Image: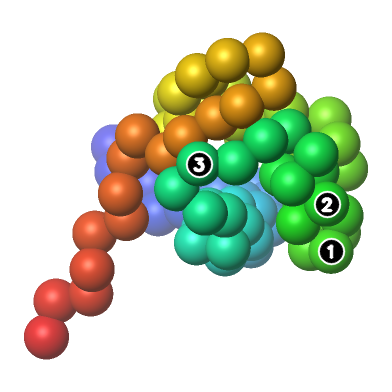
Amino acid sequence: ANILIADMKNGSKHIQIQAKQQRFFESLPDEFNWAKAVDLGQKMNMSPSSVRRYLLSGQFERNNKGWYRKVVKPVPDEQ
């Protein structure tokens, strides 16, 4: 049974969170430190704990203590 995200309970909230995370991802440089991520996150109304969860989501690699880099590049829009 296929269910559209928009038809699910809180589906639109899930879409909004994904859009915010995508904007956050695009705002980050390829390599950055924890403080930079938290600063950008706060400017986008993300709590430090939300930033931490997102950094551990698999789209980033931890280089050294407090330093991360992007490992997944967003797919460009098809035209």
Q: How many marks?
A: 3
Residues at discs 2 and 3 in contact (Cβ within 8 Å) = no
Residues at discs 2 and 1 in contact (Cβ within 8 Å) = yes
Q: Is residue 8 above or below residue 67?
A: below
Question: Residue 14 location, x and y as percent?
Answer: 61, 51
Q: Amino acid at mark 3?
A: Glu
Q: Residue at x 30, y 49 (%)?
A: 73
Q: Is residue 40 left or right of residue 63?
A: right
Q: Residue at x 50, y 19 (%)?
A: 63
Kindly identify which residue carries mark 2. Answer: 39
Q: Nearer the viewer, mark 2 or mark 1?
A: 2
Q: Looking at the rendering, which quadrant does residue 33 occupy?
A: top right
Q: Amino acid at mark 2?
A: Asp
**Furthest residue toward left:** 79
Q: Nearer the viewer, mark 2 or mark 3?
A: 3
Question: Residue 23 location, x and y as percent?
Answer: 57, 64
Kindly identify which residue carries mark 3. Answer: 31
- Mark 2 or mark 3: which comes first in sequence? 3
Q: Is residue 17 something that shows in the picture?
A: yes
